[in-house]
Amino acid sequence: MITLKSNIAKGLLVLLASYPQLSAAQEFTAAEVLEWDAAAQSGLIQNSISMIAILAAQKGDSGEYAKCVGDWYGVPQTIPNRIEAIVNFWEQYGDYHPQAVILALVEDECVQVFSQ
């Protein structure tokens, strides 16, 4: 039986395949985001982390990757440190898409769970 969750996941994959984002961005780069004010940067970071967590929850690993993402970013006391780490990565990888840089950092932090 085809479920709503399955249809949404398939639709998202079709959408992503139809509109691929290159990691080496030519039009939207981390360097551009560094020019934004802190509130706008924080908004992009929050939305990106939320999407990573949502997709991670679909991964089929009993939620371990999503839990890792939440544990890494979702603790209020550590959020300023995580934002600083992301901004530092944007500075290092300014030619890349900002969301690809965030994903790379999250994968690095959750490497043991992600590689399962």
Image (cartoon, rainbow, N blue to C red):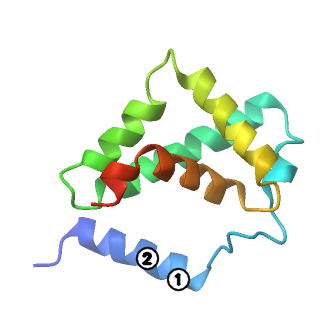
Q: Which residue is mark 1?
A: 17
Q: Write the residue at 62% across / 78% down.
A: 20
Q: Write the residue at 56% across / 48% down.
A: 105
- Give the position of the N terminus as an image quadrant: bottom left
Q: Write the residue at 40% across / 51% down.
A: 111
Badge 1 marks a residue whose secondary structure is helix
Instruction: Please state the horizontal and vertical placement of residue 64, each as a whole percent of the image.
Output: 25, 46
User: What is the quadrant of residue 25 in the picture?
Assistant: bottom right
Residue flagged by tag 2: what amino acid is it? Leu
Labels 2 & 1 near each other (Cβ < 8 A): yes
- Give the position of the C terminus as an image quadrant: bottom left
**What label sits on residue 13 in the rendered view?**
2
Q: With 48 as the anchor, is 114 left or right in this view?
A: left
Rendered view: 60 above or below 42: below
Instruction: Please state the horizontal and vertical placement of residue 88, each as a whole percent of the image.
Output: 74, 38
Q: With 107 as the anchor, is 89 left or right in this view?
A: right
Instruction: Please state the horizontal and vertical placement of residue 35, each as a whole percent of the image.
Output: 90, 42
Q: Nearer the viewer, residue 4 or 80?
A: 80
